[in-house]
Image (spheres, helix red, strand yellow):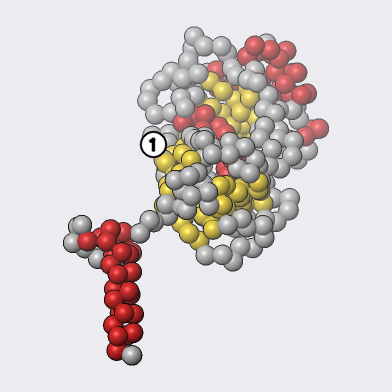
Amino acid sequence: MQALSRSFSWDFSLQLKSLLSPYRAGNTTPSLSQLPMVQLTATPASALADEPVHIRVTGLRPLQMVTLMASLKDEKGNVFWSRAFYKANEVGELDLMQTPAFGGDYVGVHPMGLFWSLKPKKAFQRLLKKDVMNSPFWITLNLYDSVCFEDVITDQVMASQVVQRWFSGPGLQRVQIREGRVRGALFLPPGEGPFPGVIDLFGGRGGLVEFRASLLAARGFAVLALAYFAYEDLPSDLLEIDLEYFEEAANLLLAHPKRMMNSRPIHPCVTLPQTRTFLCLCFGEETLLPMPQPRSTPGERS
């Protein structure tokens, strides 16, 4: 019996030595810090909202399948989210600039897919930034083990990262405009200028929408975000608009000292066909920026 006990102890000692042998060279003992650690990185962590973000994951098991999820809350508390399923390579890494998603809200190689596929948790909500000057969108990226199909994910988060998406840069100025009939906000880049001039007319929802204008100003344009109905004392309905209102707004920007005098007169960025027609008559087709094309279905890149 004692011989059997000594044999068992000897065999166990040999197995233990073989497990610890990789650590004996450095005269250390195994610890959690020496085990592979899953890391999720997103760079830059803080940037303008139109700047690409490079997302990478390291420390996964070879060929491990995972879920990446993005989520944010707008200023009203509405939640927007997206997710995609990925498979790690042979060394346990993901690089969204190279690794294709095989399911979720999109498929294929889309480095910014988690951002442009964001959708509302509650139907019929639109993602719009209200305060463009003082706060960013805070987008949380979470990594989950395995493929998560459920809308409510109960799995433990393997790794997480928060990125800030800003709509203004240092030194950007915002000037509220209430001159004559014109209502809007003028965004000016830092410096004395002069700068190319742009009038931004955002869609047909009414009110004053500023996030596109502020981003253009952060890239070096003098931009007038122009409200033209359903705002302050402007007409409440799109059909009540006096088209000469746009000419008055254009003349206001043309007269601004920081607008580049040797550039084309004005560059309206507008989606409504009837408004584009009038502006073409006033300023010429070549002065209009290309009309943005809406995304046809959720999760499909335009």
Image quadrant containing the N terminus: bottom left
Towards the viewer: 146 or 157: 146
Front-most of 53 and 121?
A: 53
Residue position for label 1 = 170
Q: Position of residue 15 (x, y in %)?
A: 33, 69
In this orientation, does residue 196 appear?
A: yes
Crowding near the residue tagged with mark 1, few <14, some 14–19, many ≥20 C-alpha atoms within 10 Å: few
**Can you give x and y, in whole percent of width and height, for residue 127 in the image?**
63, 46
Image mark count: 1
Q: Residue at x 71, y 33 (%)?
A: 294
**Quarter occupied by the C terminus:** top right
- Would you say residue 30 is visible in this rendering? no
Front-lying residue, 255 or 20: 20
Residue sitting at x 58%, y 44%: 114
> Amino acid type of disc 1?
Pro
Residue 210 x, y percent position in the rendering: 57, 37
Vertical placement of residue 145 versus 196, above or below: below
Question: Which residue is at the far right?
Answer: 239
Look at the picture and state if 145 lies above or below 210: below
Q: Give left or right: position of 103 versus 34.
A: right
- Residue found at the far bottom of this picture: 1
**Percent coordinates x, y for residue 218 in the rendering:** 46, 31
In this image, 174 relative to 230: left or right? left
Q: Which quadrant of the structure image shows residue 29?
A: bottom left
Name the residue: 37% across, 25% down.
Answer: 191
- Residue at x 65% of width, y 21% of height: 290
Extreme-left residue of the structure: 27
Q: Secondary structure at mark 1?
A: loop
